[in-house]
Image: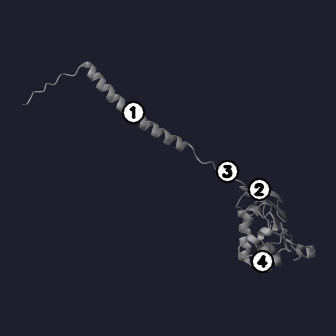
């Protein structure tokens, strides 16, 4: 009933074939692992390209500063930095006027003009510094915008924020896109503003 099985010693050929299959199996597994790692390495090498557009602003500092002229700062630069770049206030600058009218913490917008008057210059300028002058939405300071009817400091800041976020106003009608400026306010403002 029971038969005795005899195990024949492996021949050299069978041993070589067995080892070959074993090596081939390891090689296939290794190849799959290497090709997976290769794909991951290729993915890691591809990085998104970041392009900065309009990362600088150009502005004009004039009047009673040591070095009046056109300057360039990184976007987000402040009025105080601009005055510093222009050498600071001259000895003839109306410091009291600057204290009241210029917000040195305000962010500079592209194309902005910062003018520092001389002591007693307001008397010489007279009518040219009147309320009838249109306010430029792209260069106006917070205090300039605050002089517009119905525009307080909060809406003035929203106008500046919109200007900075969108690279300035391209048309005065864009002012209607600023939160807090409705049709009635727009009708009051449209003759008092420009770009």
Q: Are marks 3 and 2 in contact (CB under 8 Å)?
A: no
Which circle's residue, 4 or 2, is located before the other in the chain? 2
Task: Give the number of the mark in front: 2 or 1.
Answer: 1
Which circle's residue, 4 or 1, is located before the other in the chain? 1
Locate the N terminus by quadrant: top left
Q: Do the residues labelled 4 and 2 touch (CB within 8 Å)?
A: no
Tell me the distance, in whole angstroms, between the alpha carbons under discs 4 and 2: 37 Å
Task: Give the number of the mark in front: 4 or 2.
Answer: 4
Task: Give the number of the mark in front: 3 or 2.
Answer: 3
Q: Mark 3 points at which residue?
A: 51
Q: Which of 46 and 25 is in front in this view?
A: 25
Q: Mark 4 points at which residue?
A: 183
Q: How crowded is mark 1: few (under 14 residues within 10 Å), some or many (20 or more)?
A: few
Tell me the distance, in whole angstroms, between the alpha carbons under discs 3 and 4: 38 Å
Tell me the distance, in whole angstroms, between the alpha carbons under discs 3 and 1: 43 Å
Q: Name the residue under label 1.
A: 28
The residue depicted at 26 percent of the width and 22 percent of the height is: 14
Report x, y in % for residue 70.
82, 57
Report x, y in % for residue 158.
71, 71
SS class, disc 4: helix
In the rendered view, tell whether residue 13 sits above or below residue 35: above
SS class, disc 3: loop
Q: Name the residue under label 2.
A: 72
Q: Residues within 10 Å of mark 3 (few under 14, many from 20)?
A: few
Which circle's residue, 2 or 1, is located before the other in the chain? 1
Asked if residue 106 can be seen in this view, the reply is no
The residue depicted at 70 percent of the width and 63 percent of the height is: 165
């Amino acid at each position: 009933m029971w038969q005795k099985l005899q195990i024949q010693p492996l021949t050299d050929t069978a041993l070589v074939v067995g080892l070959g299959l074993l090596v081939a199996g390891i090689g296939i597994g290794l190849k799959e692992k290497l090709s997976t790692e290769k794909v991951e390495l290729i993915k890691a090498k591809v990085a998104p390209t970041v392009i900065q557009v309009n990362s600088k602003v150009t502005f004009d500092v004039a009047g009673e500063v040591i070095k009046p002229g056109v300057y360039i700062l990184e976007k987000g630069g402040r009025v105080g930095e601009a005055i510093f770049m222009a050498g600071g206030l001259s000895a003839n600058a109306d410091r009291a006027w600057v204290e009241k009218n210029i917000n040195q913490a305000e962010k500079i917008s592209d194309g902005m003009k910062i003018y520092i008057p001389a002591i007693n210059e307001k008397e010489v300028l007279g009518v040219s510094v009147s309320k009838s002058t249109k306010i430029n939405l792209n260069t106006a300071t917070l205090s300039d915008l605050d002089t517009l009817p119905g525009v307080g400091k909060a809406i003035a800041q929203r106008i500046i924020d919109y200007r900075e976020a969108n690279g300035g106003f391209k048309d005065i009608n864009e002012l209607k896109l600023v939160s807090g400026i409705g049709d009635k306010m727009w009708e009051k403002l449209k003759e008092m503003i420009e770009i």
